[in-house]
């Protein structure tokens, strides 16, 4: 098992090195800072893009408190507690980092927007490894994953190359839904992971269509503002999952659960009621 883990890490590192060699650098596009909504209210520049980060602070603080308040989330392993602590710290820090960036968007401030998001991403990956693969490996991976995320941010800042940061964002977006579907969960309510993934995907679409949405809504709200609100739904769903879940006694993946449900639906749909009919002989009466 230990050899297999080493092989996995070697393959991952080799793939990363090859990717860095064969792909060109991805510089930060300065047009990224040109958001659709520049309106100012109450003396706050880019007001809606700034204040729409407030939900991150609320859910981050709530989640962090519940992690430690009488073990409300019923976290059974120390690694889980550390992972979720880092996650909620990252979520709460997004509120400050993103608000700071949107007050005056530029590359220097963008570091403080992306850094807490990266902490949240990498913490979730560690949590998933703990829950779905192995507790010890997941706990050990927390620090290396966090450091990898932080290094990716500073690599972009100093070398103007977004490739490592893009991987940090891209890999969890693919790996977490796939792992949620294929690997048996330790806890119930595993489908909340998929709801969180859906809202994150929606947030990315809204980010890409910032100006389009601003035009569609007749300059009421921009896509980037909606992106903040949808992205904040990710920790909301994960917090609901933590509050509701319990230990899964019969561990089976979501894919297996769906197969069983689909089989039952098909069987119910193919059931045909059988009717037994008996016929009696009708006497023939001859006419006189």
Image: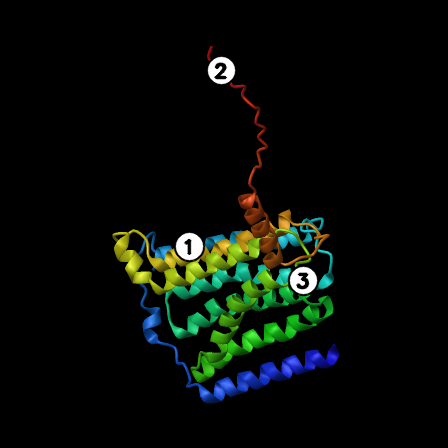
Mark 3 in CB contact with mark 2 (< 8 angstroms) = no
Mark 1, residues whose alpha carbon is within 10 Å: few (<14), some, or many (≥20)?
A: some
Q: Where is residue 107 in the image (x, y as percent from the top left)?
A: 40, 74
Based on the displayed image, in which of its 4 quarters is residue 210 positioned? bottom left
Based on the displayed image, in which of its 4 quarters is residue 184 positioned? bottom right
* Mark 1 → mark 3, Cα distance in angstroms: 32 Å
Residue 17 can be seen in this image: yes
Q: Where is residue 195 in the image (x, y as percent from the top left)?
A: 51, 54
SS category of the residue bearing label 3: helix
Residue 61 can be seen in this image: no
Q: Which residue is situated farthest in the top direction here? A: 288
* Mark 1 → mark 2, Cα distance in angstroms: 94 Å
Q: Where is residue 188 in the image (x, y as percent from the top left)?
A: 65, 52
Residue carrying label 2: 286
Residue 152 position (above or below residue 43)? below
Residue carrying label 3: 131
Q: Which residue is drawn at 59% across and 81% down?
A: 12
Residue carrying label 1: 52
């Amino acid at each position: 098992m230990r050899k297999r883990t080493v092989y996995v890490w070697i393959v991952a590192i080799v793939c990363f090195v090859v990717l860095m060699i064969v792909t060109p650098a991805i510089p930060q596009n300065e047009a990224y800072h040109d958001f659709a909504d520049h309106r100012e209210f109450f003396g706050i520049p880019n007001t809606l893009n700034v204040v729409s980060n407030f939900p991150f602070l609320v859910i981050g603080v709530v989640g962090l408190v519940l992690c430690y308040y009488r073990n409300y989330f019923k976290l059974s392993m120390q690694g889980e507690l550390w992972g979720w602590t880092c996650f909620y710290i990252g979520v709460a820090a997004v509120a400050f980092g993103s608000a700071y960036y949107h007050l005056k968007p530029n590359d220097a401030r963008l570091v403080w927007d992306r850094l807490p998001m990266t902490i949240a991403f990498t913490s979730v990956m560690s949590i998933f490894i703990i829950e779905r693969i192995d507790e010890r490996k997941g706990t050990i991976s927390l620090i290396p994953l966090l450091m990898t995320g932080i290094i990716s941010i500073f690599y972009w800042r100093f070398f103007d190359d977004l490739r490592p940061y893009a991987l940090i964002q891209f890999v969890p977006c693919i790996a977490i839904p796939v792992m949620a579907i294929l690997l048996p969960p330790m806890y119930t309510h595993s489908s909340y992971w998929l709801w969180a993934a859906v809202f994150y995907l929606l947030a990315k679409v809204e980010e890409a269509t910032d100006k389009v949405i601003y035009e569609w809504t007749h300059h009421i709200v921009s896509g980037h503002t909606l992106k903040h609100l949808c992205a904040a739904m990710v920790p909301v769903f994960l917090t609901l999952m933590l509050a509701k879940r319990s230990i899964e006694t019969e561990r089976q993946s979501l894919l297996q659960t769906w197969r069983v449900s689909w089989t039952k639906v098909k069987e119910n749909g193919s059931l045909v009621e059988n009717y037994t009919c008996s016929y009696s002989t009708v006497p023939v009466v001859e006419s006189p």
